[in-house]
Amino acid sequence: MTTSSSPKLLETAVVIVGAGPGGLALAADLSSRGIKSVLLESRTETTFHPRATLLGARSMELYRRFGIADKILAAGLPTDQPYAVTFATRLSGHVLHAYSSPSPDDYLAAHETMESPLRDAAWTPYFKVQIGQHALEPIVRELVESQGESTVMYGWQFDAFKQDDTGVECEITNVETGEKRLVRGAYLVGCDGGGSRVRAQLGVRYTGRGAMRRNISYLFRSSEFLKYATVGRANLYFMFLPGNFGVFTNIDGGNLWNYQHYVLDPNEDRDAIDAPAEIRRAMGCDFPFEILGVMRWQHHQSVAESYRDRRVFLCGDSAHLFCPTGGVGMNTAISDAFDLGWKLAANLRGWGGEELLESYEWERRPIAFRNTIAAANNADRIDALMKATTPAVEEDSEEGRRLRERLGKQVAEFTRVINSMGLHVGYRYAQSPVIAGDGSAEPPDDYRMVVQSTWPGCRAPHAWVSPHFSTLDYFDGQSFTLVCSDPAIDVEPLAAAARDTGVPMKLVHLADPAIIALYERPLVLVRPDGHVCWRGTELPKDPRALWLLVTGRKNAAAAPAAKAGAAMAVAA
């Protein structure tokens, strides 16, 4: 019991520490389910530095549920511009290799026509979107605040926690006034980055390769950048010049830029580097610009040894650190949040058991290894090519021409390898304790392409049902969805078992032969997060046992009383 001199106590269901992409996504997901949260952030505002700059197709699919996909597209680079990447000696030097992918508009055209000549458009409604974290965070923050379920507290620092059998109590401090408060929730989720105080108090260490190459990021403004960059307009420019290895990123379409300088020499003093001189040297001449910020950081391939201690969870960079090659770091954090959100909500609502909470680590930690290793391998490849580059690469000599030709071929092969749509969309939960496997062979996990499948654990396949309506839109995040393509099957026993065990479920009937073929089985059960958890040609012999398994209550003595109401039918 608090006294008049004790810090004020704020109570909620879930305490979230950190309002980066993972924390904001988790607050939005919980709010969409009517779950109260307190979102703590020591910064007084959303981030100023772009940091991560690529939002993958799967993240866009997840944000589509909240109706903010169009806002995100509008806040990124112009949607009519192709996603272009140039590899050059300098911005005004020799082009080694260049390629471009279709623009977001090219993909969005399929929303209307339901068809596209683009291969990737058959797998997802979205292509990757280049948007800085600084532009994404305000959009999701506005969403969270409009939902009205989360108490958003910027300028409050998390200090420490203590947990017991019923909840977690956190000590927090206002960074401007020094005021102390207590926040108590049933659960605590640390989304507070690589320097996570939550992870530190848990005593959880990272495993993996750890810190790798050092980097310096220079954020600068220049309205004349493209005038001087004679190698042409691009989203990304990789620099192959000894002393100036790195990448320029187009942040807002032409005025705001970030130069990520690769410090390949481990003995180089980062603090002694002359930032303006580095940028001018990479350009190849003097040009007008204004440096807005400098950030020193390191590549990582690091995954937390565990993701959970009783009522405390780790999410996003608190659980894993990346190399940015492949653009999967921020997107892995967002997917963490959408995996954890529905499970916390299910537990708090009474129809999700202990095994469901345990499954968060079983599902997301292998994906963190998969993604961090893929990104680190990409970084190793690009570093190896840069380290092998000599000053002769700029010479107008026979040696220089041969070197550029050879390097261009190597870079072209590298770009083929790092095509990452499968990395973003094709992940699956192969060893989850709450997925009912059917013994069939796992489809290929190819980082370059998506093999759409209803193999249990995979993200349910995308196909256009009607203009602007994807099969993914059936999975609204609020309930399990039974996809049925055989009207002769009586699904009422499964629906009745859902009601009996308190699980929200809706029914979707498929009629389109192409979509029926894509879904591979006449019965496919999809979780609230859009992943398949069971499929079959007929109903399970014990429908109740299936529901207890997929909601993490397989070992529970009894299921709670029904809370979800009757199953709903949706015609396709």
Image (cartoon, helix red, strand yellow):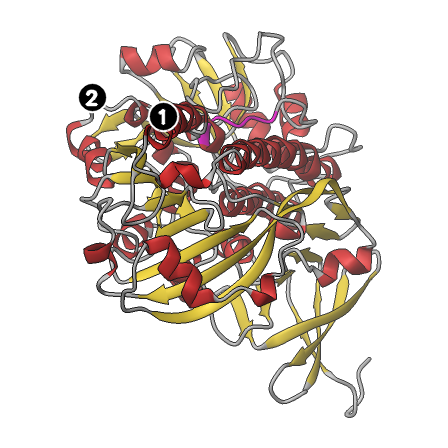
Left or right of residue 526, residue 15 in this image? right
Residue 144 picture location, percent across and down: 45, 62
Locate residue 272: give its quadrant: bottom right
Image quarter in which the C terminus is found:
top left
Residue 466 picture location, percent across and down: 21, 28
Query: In this view of the protein, which residue sits in the foreground, 526 or 217?
Result: 217
Q: Which mark is residue 411?
A: none
Seen at 63% across and 28% down, the residue is 550
Q: Which mark is residue 402?
A: 1
Q: Amino acid at mark 1?
A: Arg
Left or right of residue 275, residue 127 in this image? left
Locate residue 196: give its quadrant: bottom right
Ranked by sequence position, the earlier of labels 2 and 1 is: 2
Residue 385 picture location, percent across and down: 50, 32
Q: Dot 1 surroundings within 10 Å: few (below 14), some, or many (20 or more)?
A: few
Q: Which residue is mark 2?
A: 117
Q: Which residues are magenta?
A: 425-429
Queried whether the magenta region covers residue 24, the answer comes back as no
Numbered circles on residues, count? 2
Q: Amino acid at mark 2?
A: Pro
Which residue occupies the extreme bottom position in the image?
Answer: 4
Left or right of residue 568, residue 497 in this image? right
Report how far apart the C-alphas of labels 2 and 1 lie in the structure.
Answer: 37 Å
